[in-house]
Image: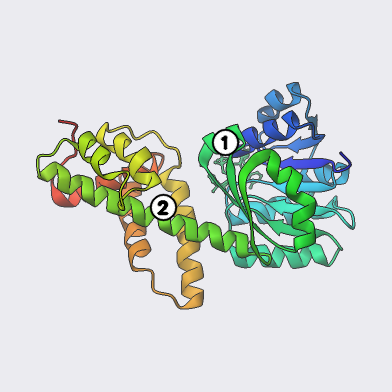
Amino acid sequence: MSEKIGFIGLGIMGQGMVRNLLQKGFEVYIWNRTHPKMDPLLELGAHAATSPADVASHATIIITCVSDTPDVEHVMLQANGVIFGAKAGDLVIDMSTISPEITRRLARAFADRNVHMLDAPISGGSEGAANGTLSIMVGGDAEQVARAMPVFEAMGKTITHVGAIGAGQTVKLVNQILVVVTMLGVSEALLFAQAGGLDLHKTIEAVAQGAAGSWMLSYRGPQVVDRDWRPGFTIDLQQKDLRLVLEAADQMGVPMLGTGMVFNLYRTLQQQGLGLEGNHALVKALENLAGIEIRDQ
Ligand code: NAP
């Protein structure tokens, strides 16, 4: 393999993604702000770099997967950032979920140095990252997407080139609208079922394969009934993404009635200190309004 991979951001997602790249035989240079998180991957054969610029100086395809828009800007552009190590012809791929507008701005900064950029946000949770089954939504030039395809295929199952740079992030935000508005429907339906005295697991079983079926109902519905609030995706990170949705919608002049309402419902839960619970804990905000609690009966 002629491409050498750099990877910055070894959080919940990055850990699994790098493991899969190593398993597929890629040479991978890694860096993480909190250095000890590099250790398990170094044991598997990754090479340690000393900064994002150092990662870029060793690699030809440099991937970032960090938390939020300012964090991506930081690792890309600040002192010792990717831009100071990247060479003409290199390809930078941001796989974090961030602002589409800032993504386009970053791409212009790299283009000024003849460095290519793709945005390739992901969906599929920590399980998808660990199992190499992520959905990857890619924006950018077709030629660079083709170049990166073996790298994407090492980490994901459904890889879709959705348009120009920034389009990947916009599709990811579409994904997030669908996730939260579906979860609102699941929450309201389960609360209604509870008030109606139904067996909630049986109710889910009865409707999940019909027109009302969804991933959120099948996977998070039973968790709600069992009052298991462990996160696949935390409320705090969900809010980060909804903020991106609402900002982009504001710029485009699109009303976001459902998403706006869910954003405010999650805010009430954050105020109660529940930001680290899973996004399916949305039901708690409706329970508070209804004065009813969902219980397996
Ligand atoms: P995470 O476990 O919280 O990890 C965040 C990573 O970003 C860590 O490596 C952290 O370094 C690094 N980071 C944050 N701010 C930084 C900064 N200013 N400078 C340098 N490094 C910084 O998050 P995650 O779950 O892996 O998520 C990463 C991205 O994928 C996010 O954009 C998230 O929205 C997206 N995503 C997550 C999921 C999911 O289910 N978890 C699913 C799809 C998409 P430290 O180790 O030093 O803190």
Residue 72 coordinates in the image, percent (x, y): 66, 53
Q: Is residue 121 left or right of residue 42?
A: left
* Quarter occupied by the N terminus: top right
Q: Secondary structure at mark 2?
A: helix
Question: Which amino acid is tagged 2?
Answer: Val
Q: Nearer the viewer, residue 260 or 21?
A: 21
Q: Is residue 30 left or right of residue 234?
A: right
Q: Nearer the viewer, residue 89 or 86?
A: 89
Q: Is residue 219 left or right of residue 66?
A: left
Up-down relation of residue 176 to residue 203 (above or below): below
Can you tell which mark lies on residue 12?
Answer: 1
Are the residues flagged by discs 1 and 2 in contact, CB closer than 8 Å? no
User: Measuring 37% from the left and 58% from the top, which residue is drawn there?
Assistant: 263
User: Measuring 70% from the left and 29% from the top, which residue is drawn there?
Assistant: 38
Residue 78 coordinates in the image, percent (x, y): 74, 54
User: Measuring 34% from the left and 35% from the top, which residue is drawn there?
Assistant: 229
Q: Nearer the viewer, residue 297 or 83?
A: 297
Residue holding disc 2? 179
Residue 284 coordinates in the image, percent (x, y): 25, 44
User: How are the colours assigned in the image?
Assistant: rainbow
Q: Secondary structure at mark 1?
A: helix
Q: Residues within 10 Å of mark 1 (few under 14, many from 20)?
A: some
**Which quadrant holds residue 163?**
bottom right
User: Measuring 47% from the left and 48% from the top, which residue is drawn there?
Assistant: 237
Q: Residues within 10 Å of mark 2 (few under 14, many from 20)?
A: some
Counting labels gives 2
Residue at the limit of the structure toward the bottom, as seen here: 253
Up-down relation of residue 49 to residue 142 (above or below): above
Question: Which amino acid is tagged 1?
Answer: Ile
Beta carbon at label 1 within 8 Å of ligand 1:
yes
